[in-house]
Image (spheres, coloured by chain):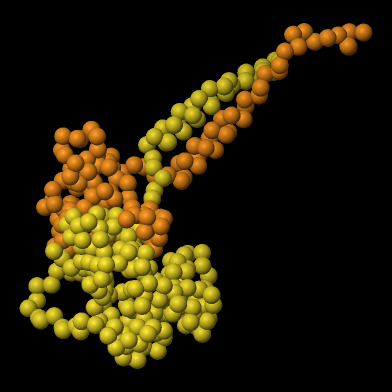
Amino acid sequence: MSKFKKKKGGGLPPINTAALPDIVFMLLFFFMVATEMREDTLKIKNSMPVADQVEKLDKKNPVSFIYMGSPKEEYKKLGTQARIQLNDKFADVDEVIAFIGAERAALREELVPFLTVSLKVDKESNMGIVGDVKQELRKANALKINYATGTGDATSNM
Amino acid sequence: MAKRDVPEVNAGSMADIAFLLLIFFLVTTTIPKDTGLNRKLPPIDDSEFEPPVIKQKNIFTVLLNGKDQLLVEDEVMEIKDLRKAAIDFLDNGGDGSCSFCKGLKDEKSSDNPDKAIISLKNERETSYAAYIAVQNELVAAYNTLRNRRALEVGPKKGFRDMDFITMQKNYKDVKWYGNKAKLKKLIDKIKLEIPQKLSEVVN
């Protein structure tokens, strides 16, 4: 009656991991679709205030980003005053016009009037620097701006 | 000749490769956060023209000082009351020319939404968060009135139960199948009736 012989070992059967790559690929594709490449490495603190009357930034039109905020821990020697970051480096207020010029030069000509400037400003910064940048943008005739914010109750900002 | 067995490819490390890619994408990408308040800056005006004289009662002054305190029409106010105050000002309809206003028709407040101007002044020391909060409340005041107007006018034009925000969203939505040309006309009409006249003082 060898049919009823006890199996040797009798331990746990190995878990089938053949589907593991499928699961990981699924996650991979999700992240590839739902996220986008980091454009600039931030050298400043950048946690944005919240507002509830927000609109989605229109991605069909070209967008340039201007970051403002106090320098991160690594750049502590620059002080705690809010600073401007254009592309990957710190900049002064008078460089904004040149930056807008460069952004426009990179665009197709018919898209130039639709350039939106998104101001990503840290909530800890003061309006002084923001006002200066706004004035420079007016000089550069880049009048469409967007204050990047999170979504939430705006009165919690104060 | 006997058939040769094709050896099975070992796929055990496939998961490792996929994990590697996954972690690479997790590190190098961000989930985009692209919401915000859209505003338009006024162009720099070099012309010598005298600006038109605006009656004081048509201006709603909002002042935000360096300590984030709010002064509205020369009175101290809390941020939570600002939206209501702005709506009351815009919706006043003092000269009776505005057919859809439901305000108090106060002689001392604005004539009609077309003439009413909100003037916002901030100081250099004002915090950005407070500024955004105030901007948000003022935009909210305009949006509230536009929504109300849209719900009144919409049904007559065949856009039932759609407030102004929904209209704008639908207009931009490629999957929305209504009459976009008609909707655009309605949006522009409401925008013209209740224009966003929010001026900022440059200091």
Q: Identify the residue at image location x=33%, y=73%.
A: B86
Of the 4 image quadrants, the one containing the N terminus of chain B is top right
Q: Is residue A35 left or right of residue B69?
A: right
The yellow-tinted chain is B
Residue at point 19%, 35% (across, down): A76
Toward the viewer: B83 or B155?
Answer: B83
> Residue placed farthest to the front in the image?
B76
Quarter of the image with the C terminus of chain B in it: bottom left
Residue A74 locus on image (x, y percent): 23, 33
The reply to whether residue B82 is visible in this rendering is yes
Chain in orange? A
Q: Which residue occupies 30% across, 67% down? A: B77
The residue at the far bottom in this view is: B96
Q: Position of residue B110 (x, y in %)?
A: 29, 83
Residue pictured at 9% horizontal, 72% vertical: B46
Would you say residue A62 is visible in this rendering? no
Q: Nearer the viewer, residue A43 or B61?
A: B61
Quarter location, residue B83: bottom left
In the rendered image, the vertical position of residue A132 relative to residue A26, given as above or below: below
The image quarter in which residue B140 lies: bottom left
Pick whichever, A74 or A57, lies toward us.
Answer: A74
Which of these two is toward me, B70 or A60? B70
**Residue A105 point in image, percent of width and height:** 20, 55
Looking at this rendering, what residue extends furthest in the left direction? B48
